[in-house]
Image (cartoon, coloured by chain):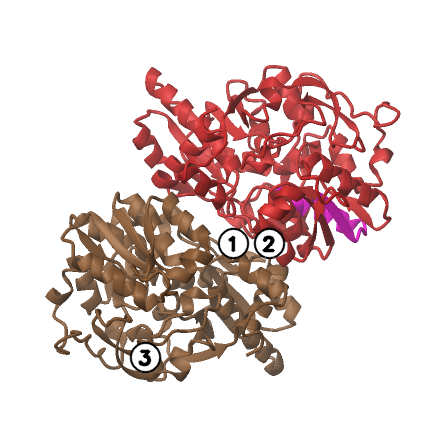
Chain colours: A red, B brown
Amino acid sequence: MTRWTLPPGDIPAAWFNIAPHLSSPLQPPLHPVTREPLAPNDLAPLFPAALIEQEMTEAPWVDVPGEVLDVLRLWRPTPLVRATRLEQALGTPARIYYKDESGSPAGSHKPNTAVAQAFYNAQEGVHRLTTETGAGQWGAALAFACAQFDLECMVYMVRASFEQKPYRRVLMETWGASVVPSPVGQPDHPGSLGTAISDAVRDAAGRGDTHYSLGSVLNHVLLHQTLIGLEAREQLTLAGETLPDVVIAPCGGGSNLGGLSLPFVPDTGVRLVAVEPLSCPTLTKGRFDYDFGDAAGYTPLLPMYTLGHDFVPPSIHAGGLRYHGDSPLISALVRDGRMEAVAYPQGKVFDAALQFARIEGKVAAPEAAHAIRAVVDEALAAKETGEETVILFNYCGHGLLDLSAYEAYLQGRLPDERG
Amino acid sequence: MTRWTLPPGDIPAAWFNIAPHLSSPLQPPLHPVTREPLAPNDLAPLFPAALIEQEMTEAPWVDVPGEVLDVLRLWRPTPLVRATRLEQALGTPARIYYKDESGSPAGSHKPNTAVAQAFYNAQEGVHRLTTETGAGQWGAALAFACAQFDLECMVYMVRASFEQKPYRRVLMETWGASVVPSPVGQPDHPGSLGTAISDAVRDAAGRGDTHYSLGSVLNHVLLHQTLIGLEAREQLTLAGETLPDVVIAPCGGGSNLGGLSLPFVPDTGVRLVAVEPLSCPTLTKGRFDYDFGDAAGYTPLLPMYTLGHDFVPPSIHAGGLRYHGDSPLISALVRDGRMEAVAYPQGKVFDAALQFARIEGKVAAPEAAHAIRAVVDEALAAKETGEETVILFNYCGHGLLDLSAYEAYLQGRLPDERG
C-alpha cells in the first residue's frame, strides 16, 4: 500500500461552500409551529451567530479560525491511502484510494465539525453544549472538542446503546462529559436518535447558558467536513491522478459523504455515490418532503429525503446511519441527479469489512464498511469492463469500539445477514 | 499542540543495533536443560535463521527489508507531537514531546516487530506462528502481521483476559487468528504470561510447519522497535531541538522502552527512564540473575532483572507491564547505571491519564499512561528548578480497548488506588 501525507501546516485555510454551486437554491427550513421560512434569529436560542451565518451563507469559501486549526493539527491533514493489496486481491484494473479519517482522537471524521462548533460557542460566551448520540461516535467527538475549549458537555444517548454499548459512554465521560439515557424519564423506552434530539434541544432551549450542537444534516456541519475532500484533491494530485472517476461514502445524516464529495460537485464528470443501509433506506426509498429532524417535532422542518420523523429503524450496527432523514444539501443533489444512492444489507457490508480487514489490515467502523462494500462492487465492475476506474472513498472511522458487531458476524449471529 | 510528520518514504532504512555500544557484552542465554551457553542452532525449532542472526549480531545497523517497509508504510513514520497544552496546564518551562505509536492498525507499537517477524518466517517457508498474549495488544499485532503475509496465527491468551476482555480476542479473530485460553486443559486456572508462553512454545516446538514469536524481551524485538527512536531523533531536529534531556517510556518486557531509548544510549548526556507498575516492580525491586522467560521453564535462561519466573503479578489494567522479567538489554543498561527506573501505583497512573485525556485530547493505553505519570512529575520538577528540560516520551498505544479501566477509575473502583 502507498500513503500520501501532508504536513500539519497544510490543512486547508478555508472551508468549501457548495451553496453557490447548486443548480437552484435550497428551499429554506420552516419554523416548526408557524411553518414560515425560518429567520436567523429563530435559531439564536440554539446556535451561535457565527454558525447561523455559516448555515445560510452564499460565500464560496469560509475561513477556518486559527484556534480551530490549532486543534485539528493534532491529527490533520489525514492520510490518503491507496489500497493496492485490495486491488490485487480483486484482480481489478481500478485504482482504489481512501481518505483515512480514523486517526482523530475520537476515531472518526466527527471531530472536524465538533471542534469548530465548540470554538464558536466558546467564543460567544456559551458555557455548556447539549447534543444527542446514537452509538456514541458523535457524542465522543463533541466531548473531546468541549474539553479542548473548557465547555461543559451534556450528551443524551439513545437508551438501547447506553445500556448495551458502555464503552463509548466511558470515552465521553473520560473527556469529562455527562451522559444520560434518552428518552429522559421513560426507563422502558429504548429511544432513537429522534427522541435524543428532542431531549437535547429541549434542554438547550430552556437554559440561557446552553446551546445545542448537531453532528450532521445541517449546512454548517457539512461545510466543516469539506476539509476531507479538499485535502483528498491535493493528495490525489500528489499520487499522480487528476480527478477520481467516482467518489463513494456512507450516508446517514450526510456529513462524511458531504465532507468528501462536495468539493467534487463542480467537477461534472466525477460520479458521486451515497451508500446507505437497506434497513434505513432514506435516499433510495424515502420521499422528498419537508419533515422534522426529531421525533417530537421541536426542530425546524427541513426539505429532505425522509422515511418520516416517527420512523424507527432496526437496530443495525451502523448506528451512525440510522437516521430517518438526510442532509438537505445531499437530498437536493440526489433529487437533481448529481448524486447516486445505493443501499446494502448488513451481511454484505460485513463480508466486505472482513475482506478489507484481512487484506488491507484495518478494521473499519460499520459505517465505513458500507462504503467498502460499494467500492468492492465498483472495482469488480471495472474488472468486467477493463476500465482503470479511479475510486476514492471515505474511511470515515475505525471499528475498535464496534467489535461486538464483528463478533456477531464471525459467529453467524448478525441479523439482516444477506438482505 | 504542534506535530511533526515525515513522509512515508522516510522510514529509516536500517534498524539501530545497541550491541556494539554496550560497555560490556551481554551474558549469553543458557540452555534450559544443560545450562550451557545457547548455540544458534538451539533456537532453530522456534525462530527463522534471520531472526537468530539478529538476536546475536554485533553489526551496528541491520537493513530493513523492502517487504517490511511496504507494510510499515501503512502508518509509519509516526508523528512526533509537542504537548503544549499540557505544558501550559502544568505551568512548566519543560518542553514535552511524545512519539505517537497509537496509529498502527493494532493501536500500539507492537506491529513494528510483528511485521518483521512475520516476514522473516514467511520467507523461510514457515506456515504458522504461535504466540502468547495477555490483554491482547501483542496478539492483535501478530494477527494483523500474519494476515499481511498469509501465515496462520495461533494465540494463547491468558485465560482471565480471554474471559473478561473479549474485544481484543475479537480483533485477533477478525484478522483471521485462532485464539484459545491458557493454560490449555486447565479451565479453572486464570493463567499468566508465563503459562501462555509455555503453551505457545510447546505448540511450536512440536510441529515442523510452526514457529514461535515473542513480542518483547529478546534482542531482535528491541532491534525492530528502534525505528521509534530513530524517527524521533530526526523529528526533534525538525522541531528545533538538538537532543532530549530525558527519554521516558513504560517498561514491561522492554520493547517500547528499548525502541525509543536505545538510539539515545550513545548520547551520554541524555537521561533514560523506565517506568513500571509498583505491583510488578521488576527493575526497581527484582534481582539481576539468570531466569526462565516462562512459568514452566521451557525457554532459555536469560540474564535479567526478575521477580522469579513463578511470580504472578496482581491483575492491574496495564496487562503489557505484567511480566516477571525484563529484556536482557534493558536489564544490563539499568545494572550499569545508564538507565534509571521508577515505579508507580495504578491510581496515580490513571490520575495522569485522565489529565492527559482532557488536556491533550488523547485516551492513553494504561501502559502509555505509566510514562505520562512520570512525564508530569518530571515537568513539575522542572517547574521547581526553572529548567527548560526537553522531555521525550513514548505514547506507545491508545486506550480505546481499555475503557473498562477508565470506567473503574471514574467510578472509584480501581484497585491499588494510591499505592
Residue designated by label 1: B400
For image coordinates 50% across by 37% down, the residue present is A366
Q: Is residue A325 visible?
A: yes
Q: Nearer the viewer, residue B35 or A182?
A: A182
| Residue B416, image x, y percentages | 54, 74
The residue under label 3 is which amino acid type? Gly
Is there one chain holding both mark 3 and mark 2?
Answer: no
Instruction: Measure the alpha-carbon separation of dots 3 and 2.
Output: 37 Å
Is A117 part of what is drawn in magenta?
yes
Kindly identify which residue carries mark 3: B308
Q: Nearer the viewer, mark 3 or mark 2?
A: 3
Q: Circles 2 and 1: CB distance less than 8 Å?
A: yes
Q: Chain of mark 1?
A: B
Q: Which residues are magenta?
A: A112-131
Q: Chain of mark 3?
A: B
Question: Is residue A1 shown to the viewer in this render?
Answer: no
**What's the residue at 63%, 15% (across, down)?**
A336
As helix, strand or loop, the secondary structure at mark 2 comes to helix
Neighbor class of circle 3 (other Cα within 10 Å; few <14, some 14-19, many 20+) is many
Instruction: Say if labels 1 and 3 share a chain.
Output: yes
What whole-number distance in Å separates the C-alpha atoms at marks 2 and 1? 8 Å
Looking at the rendered structure, the secondary structure element under dot 3 is loop
Q: State the SS at label 1.
A: loop
Q: Magenta part mainly helix, strand or loop? A: helix
Vertical side of B126 occupied by B296: above or below: below
Q: Is residue B129 left or right of residue B323?
A: left
Q: Residues within 10 Å of mark 1 (few under 14, many from 20)?
A: many
